[in-house]
Image (cartoon, rainbow, N blue to C red):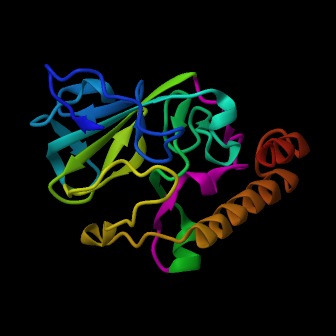
Amino acid sequence: MRPHGTDAPDPMPDSAFATEGLLHGTPVAMPDGWRMVEEVAPGDYLLTFDGGPRRVEAVQSALVETARAAWPRAHWPLRVPPGVIGNRGALRLLPDQAVLLDCDLADTMFGDPFALIPAAALQGWRGIAPEPPGAVERVATLLMAEDEVIYAGGGALVWCPGDQPIGLPMGGMMPLRGDRAGYVPLSLASARELVACLIAQDVGAALSGAAPGGYQAALRALSP
């Protein structure tokens, strides 16, 4: 792992697998449009959810070369179908990458409609499921001056850490410091409870006829 720079060589393999950061190929929003995360460099500005354009202070990157057997299924990237969390196209998220949901259930359960949760908690909701990693995966962590929530994949909200002397976490979730913007990170258990309620809400709506497709929609809500 090494700081990103235009003349920097490709990063060396760091670990058998990665659990947080943005996979290369993920578009992120900038003031002048969308750019792939691997094209973002220190000094660039990203659009943030509640702070306008904010400067990228540093970019940390990791290259993972591994056979699929060496990347535990529990830590596989998650494929998010189009539209589920605001993403326009299919989006791949690492399981410990924090995402921000805006939903009434979060307000009911936790007193805040904005819930910052690890992507792993989304599994099973509206077709979100683990996807085998490629033989080579590249991961970028965009470091900002303070914790920020940025736009990725056409509208999904993902968390970026404040600049700090850390490396990409491999196999464990980085403590979130999202309270600057009023976001209280949920534990994995609480996040899974929220998502279970979202699944139940979808099923209830489908079975009552409030959602198109009736029981077929209910089955899709439960799909792995």
Residue 202 sits inside the magenta stretch: no
Residue 36 visible here = no
* Residue 93 screen position, x and y as percent: 52, 40
Q: Is residue 112 magenta?
A: yes
Q: Report the quarter where the N terminus lies.
A: top left
Up-down relation of residue 169 to residue 80 (above or below): below
Q: Quadrant of the C terminus?
A: top right
State the image quarter where residue 177 is shown: bottom left
The quadrant holding residue 42 is: top left
Q: Position of residue 145 (x, y in %)?
A: 14, 55
Q: Total label count? A: 0
User: Where residue 208 appears, x then y in whole percent?
Assistant: 85, 56
Q: Where is residue 199 in the image (x, y as percent from the top left)?
A: 73, 57
In the drawing, does residue 151 fall left or right of residue 5? right
Nearest the viewer among 79 and 201 is: 79
The residue positioned 31% from the left and 28% from the top of the image is: 11
Furthest-right residue in this view: 215
Looking at the picture, does residue 208 appear above or below residue 43? below
19 lies above or below 77:
below
Boundaries of the magenta span: 111-134
**116 on left or right of 217:** left
Which residue shows up at 63% across the image and 71% down it?
A: 189
Is residue 212 in sight in this rendering?
yes
The residue lying at 25 percent from left, 23 percent from top is 39
Quadrant assignment, res 147 = bottom left
What residue is shown at x 18% (from left), y 27% (from top)?
Answer: 32
